[in-house]
Image: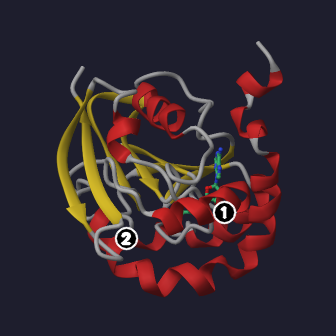
Amino acid sequence: MTLREQQPYRQNPLLRLSYSLIAPLYDAIIDRPMRDARRHSLRTLPTDASRRILISGVGTGLDLPLLPALHRYTALDFNLAMLAHARPRGKDLDVGFVLGDSMALPFAGSHFDHVVLHLILAVVPEPQRCLSEAVRVLKPGGTIILFDKFLQPRQRAPLRRLFNVITRRFATRMDVVFEEVLTAAPELQVLSDEPMLANGWFRRIELQKTR
Ligand SMILES: C[S@@+](CC[C@H](N)C(=O)[O-])C[C@H]1O[C@@H](n2cnc3c(N)ncnc32)[C@H](O)[C@@H]1O
């Protein structure tokens, strides 16, 4: 197996470097405009019994203060600077921080009850691989909570596709079509799909692993 296959983020190593530069500015740009959407997105996590929950691409940990305290969390990111910002936000949670790649998760199959994918699927170079990995580590019956920006199938969006040529290198893709990503995971059923911000460019999608 080549190094790129073991660590698929190496397809675009610039992205990891650039998130080190973005880390100190991230909260100022993202926190306020997204906070209500985050809270809304996380509302379906259970509150009855403790579960194992993976937050893949945790970033600076803006989700952490919004999570119910009874679960056992694993928060993964490939960037140490982002994880350093996230750590203090997890002080009231049972959370382990892991340096790793969302496209090659360092966990056994069927390990988690829920996976949170907030603003990560449209960031990685291979969203299908990121989703497939989330499905692999999820138990049958478990759910994925997804919040991200997606183009609609056959949507032209010429400006976004133009910007994507640059933004995909150092921040995020703008050309990801969720329906195309989903074809990589036939064991997923869509439980809900809601437009959220920016006229539905951002969507909150909940998926269940059926088998
Ligand atoms: C746009 S931020 C989203 C952070 C957080 N989920 C949120 O909702 O604010 C994307 C995060 O994904 C991380 N990331 C990008 N590619 C990754 C990869 N291949 N594996 C793990 N983390 C990755 C970046 O370091 C960054 O922290």
Residue 90 appears left or right of 181: right
Count of numbered tags: 2
Give the residue displayed 49% in from the left and 49% down from the top: 121
Secondary structure at numbered mark 1: helix
Q: Which of the two discs, 2 and 1, labels the residue nearer the N terminus? A: 2
Label for residue 38?
Answer: 2
Q: Which of 85 and 15 is in front in this view?
A: 15
Of the residues shown, which amino acid type is indicated by label 1? Answer: Thr
Q: On the image, numbered disc 1 is attached to which residue?
A: 167
* Residue 68 in the image, given as x and y percentages of width and height: 34, 64
Q: Residue 11 placed where, x, y %?
A: 75, 37
Residue 148, placed above or below residue 135: below
Q: In this view, does 26 lie to the left or right of 24?
A: left
Write down the quadrant of residue 1 in the picture. top right
Measure the C-alpha gap from mark 2 to mark 1: 23 Å
Q: Nearer the viewer, mark 2 or mark 1?
A: 1
The kind of residue on which mark 2 rests is Arg
With respect to residue 27, does 78 lie above or below? above
